[in-house]
Amino acid sequence: MRRATAAALVSVFVLAVLPRSVVAQGEDAAQLSPGTLRITLAPDWSRWDHRFGEGTPGYARGALEPAGIDFSSDSLGTGQLPFLQGVQTRVRNLTGLSAFRLNLGRAQLTLNTSVRVVPLGLELGITRRLAIGVTVPIVRSRVEAFLLGPDTGAAAAATRGNVGWNPAFLTPGALDTFRLEVDSMLNALAAQAASGPPALRAQAQAMLAGMQSQLCDLWALAGSLTPADAASPCAAAGDAQVAPLLPDTGSEAGRAITAWLGGAQANYEQLRAQYAALGVTLPGFALGFALPTTPLDSAGLRRFLTDRNGPLAADSLTSVVRTRLGDVEVGASYQLADRARLRTLVTLIARLPTGYVDSKDNLIDVGTGDHQLDVEVGLRNDIVLGSAFWIHAGGRYGMQFSDQLDRRVSPANLPFAPFAASARVKRDLGDYVAIDIVPNWRLDDAFSLGLAWRYFRQGATRFGYTDPADEARIGLPASVLDRETAITRMRIGAGMTFSTLSRYAAGRARLPYTVTASYQNTFWGAGGRVSAASVFNLTIRGYVRVWQQRER
């Protein structure tokens, strides 16, 4: 009698709690019964080292390309570092080498990214049709980076650039003596051209006109502009920040600068001697300007990227690991249809801004969430075609709300954005739509096999400055951040599910649970920088009775 009663209670419990066995495995649109708590642990691992690009030179649109391609160049220069254009222009003016291109040497960056998400989900059946739930994800993002610099590899000598460290950058004030000499010499020539001995006024004026532009370029390269420089004849040519790099002495530009300086000194000394013969003393010019003796090596390139006094002041391009909370989800589901051949479930999810967004100062960082509010509406359907075959078809639409964050404003293909380009921006992530089609085959009362096709499309993100004055300061509209932010991708995959639900209902299993292992691969992407990710997922679900449903 007790066994019969126990068996009856088990049968009632299972039938009340668990979905019908034909769709009890893998993804389904079955609703929980009132008083049933479903506990889900669904860790997944995704990794990628390539992406589906969008307009990268040398690659077809949508072709696979290395994830670090925008950081890589055989001759890193102003094409990737446009904020160094001023240094390049000054060197061209100084040397007359109109084709001179500033070159830091080779920079080849290899990126391998992996993201591990461990979400804990709790779902509780409230009524026969309504359930509520929450999902709390812990995310571990890891970016492994390997930077091949200009002095590494088999052909290291051929990959060196033509610039090295400016002595005034390494040691602030190292070229101040030269700057003072330039100021004294130019002021003296201007004074002599205006009121000096009449016989030499024309020569002083000619030398002043012939040398001032080049000397002021050197003066600007030799130090940053300070309030004390306001009276300098070169003040108009000064820069707020000292140039970190100069042509090295072995480069064509370095040799041209050295030759010009030598000629300028010789001509000035001749004129100075003529003034001395007339009893007028001009200040000396001792050529205190120094060029770097060697081009950048790998260590120098890394310092250029990370030096807090430099234009980039970014984090090092080395491995980055983040382990933090992801974007927490709270939601509800409602059963619209529950028939023998069709089940339909509508879901509503709010995704909270609890994740960690990638750092603006780490150029390769991957965050643990979008860190802004989303609302997602979904529709899930089970179409039962037989005792052993059914199709799960689902669709989701997500509305993403705007927020504010700090960014370095630069186009996506120019990731080396200077620190000076930092600004507070408004961000409006594009809305998204997703479609999932999963045919399922029941192999026996415990095992089923599913194949999946998944489509995802997200519109481009829109950016704008919170302070309109930042556009003039940075020189770019915030909308340059919009480029290549749209996402369109398709994935295919397969999964195997083991379930005790049927066996538990028959009294042949002690606990009701399901375990699903699946693998997906991104085989197509377009519209933006879509990662060619492979994803492995393991989903474990257990069921617990919280309260007993009353019989009517």
Image (cartoon, rainbow, N blue to C red):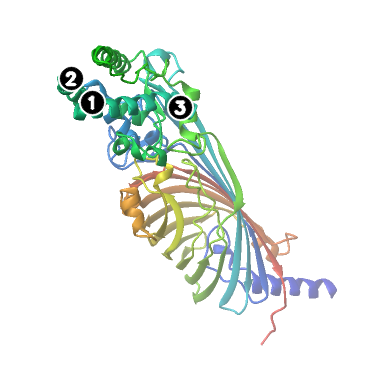
Q: Residue at x 30, y 17 (%)?
A: 261
Count up the numbered dots: 3
Q: Which residue is mark 1?
A: 192
Marks 1 and 2, how far apart in space?
Answer: 8 Å
Inspect the image, locate mark 2, and give the three-letter code of the amino acid beneath it.
Leu
- Badge 1, how many Cα within 10 Å: few under 14, some, many 20+? many
- Report the front residue among 259 and 459: 259
Q: Residue at x 25, y 16 (%)?
A: 275
Tell me the quarter of the picture where residue 276 sits: top left
Q: Closer to the camera: disc 3 or disc 2?
A: 2
**Mark 1 falls on what kind of element?**
helix
Residue 511 seen in the figure: yes
The answer to whether 333 appears left or right of 161 in the picture is right
**Mark 3 falls on what kind of element?**
helix
Contact flag, marks 1 and 2 (Cβ < 8 Å)? yes
Residue 301 got which mark? 3
Q: Closer to the camera: disc 3 or disc 1?
A: 1
Image quarter (top left, top right, bottom left or bottom right) of the C terminus: bottom right
